[in-house]
Image (cartoon, rainbow, N blue to C red):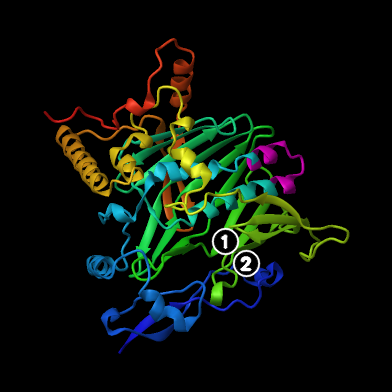
Amino acid sequence: MSNLPVTDPPETKSTGFFASMSSMFGSARRESSRSHSPERLNLEGLEVINPEGGKDDAAEEAKKGRFKPEERDSFFKMMKNYIGADVTSLVTLPVTIFEPMTMLQKMAELMEYSHLLDKADECEDPYMRLVYASSWAVSVYYAYQRTWKPFNPILGETYEMVNHGGITFLSEQVSHHPPMSAGHAENEHFTYDITSKLKTKFLGNSLDVYPLGRTRVTLKRDGVILDLVPPPTKVNNLIFGRTWIESPGEMIMTNLTTGEKVVLYFQPCGWFGAGRYEVDGYVYNAAEEPEILITGKWNESMQYQPCDLEGEPRPGTELKEVWHVADVPEDDKFDYTYFAHKLNSFDTAPRKLLPSDSRLRPDRYALEMGNITKSGAEKSRLEERQRAEKKIREAKGETFKTKWFDITKEVATTPWGDLEICKYNGKYTQHRAAIDSSDIDEVDNKSVEFNPWQYPPPS
């Protein structure tokens, strides 16, 4: 028998939000201990964590997961050379670990509970406005716990969504190296703008994901601008054991117009799952005094209650629910919500869909239909075409030109590095208005060939 280093979840002293406030501004830490493992798993530095168990469950947990033993060992031999590296775009991965959705579509999942932003816009109380808006930001984490990998978008790829809460949503892949996406959503109550760029660190059997991006929401009634900084995410048991995801740390949403903010702390997972889903925090006034406490679980619901300057509930008040996760399909192959299925459906597509839309990707569609062999072949074909386009651009001395977003000279500072900001240029609004008001014949979106390309196909 050989020793298997195991990273274990820390113990949590309390599951209540008052106890968690003492570490509100701290970072989540893990302590290391050792456990025995089968000799065939003699892998130095391997992290194996059973979220429902204790430190003695790591060895058995390492044998579980979606990979067959021979696939798992082979995959680790390939990946171990990247330990400590940012693997965002370094590694070509098999479609067997993918879900039939792209990162551009995953960006749109934040719109599922967009009615909370509608309520924030309608709300006159500045503190309740942040209760609604921050609950909206928490709501997507139920969907983000899926452990399947989305497809990386092709440069120039887009995703459009309509027929949900009066929203028009558009995202575009604006850079391939480094991967960067931009998104814009709008309805009568708000606009949503995001520049998304992930930074990762591969740790052997886990992956740290840092959201090196900027998210802004503008509430239209008063012109209030909200800035969102989410916590980092950790993908545990990436190769050995059952993969699971957590996001321990702070989420901060700031009203840049008036100075109020909300700070929510996502609890790390403790022994036997203690605290795994819990989120606790406060809405603060501009003087950084607590006004409303917020507590709940990101996989169930969020509640709020007015509090005093000590953070204690005000007499005569009670916890009230502000958000509850919607019903989800049972035994779904990819753990999709009903909304996730809508994102792949042409029911949420506008009239005359852009040919660069993610729904039209042949590799994504083949995986959705269960044809893994075809999906892998189509994925390779698209990646080859993308590399060929890059060579053509370099030979011509040209650069890729974005269509719907402009990469500006504005640089934002985030907790994980600087970020060039992409700005929605408004051209899509004009494009969509022209189509919607035209008399052009209806086009069957399903028949459109995927085409994000800058140049004609090579002859």
Q: Give the amino acid at mark 2.
A: Met
Q: Are marks 2 and 1 in contact (CB under 8 Å)?
A: yes
- Residue 433 placement (x, y as % from top left): 49, 18
Residue drawn at the location 81% of the way across and 58% of the way down = 318
Considering the whole magenta stretch, tell me its main secondary structure: helix
Q: Nearer the viewer, residue 237 or 423?
A: 237
The kind of secondary structure element at disc 2 is: loop
Q: Nearer the viewer, residue 397 or 167?
A: 167
What are the residue bounds of the magenta stretch? Answer: 116-129
How packed mark 1 is, by other alpha carbons closer than 10 Å (few <14, some 14-19, many 20 or more), is many
Q: CA distance from mark 2 to mark 1?
A: 7 Å
Amino acid under disc 1: Glu
Can I make out residue 340 in this image? yes
Dividing the picture into quadrants, the one containing residue 280 is bottom right
Q: Residue furthest bottom?
A: 1
Q: Circle 1 is placed at which residue position?
A: 250
Task: Return the x and y of residue 436 as percentages of the image width and height.
Answer: 48, 17
- The residue indicated by pointer 2 is 24
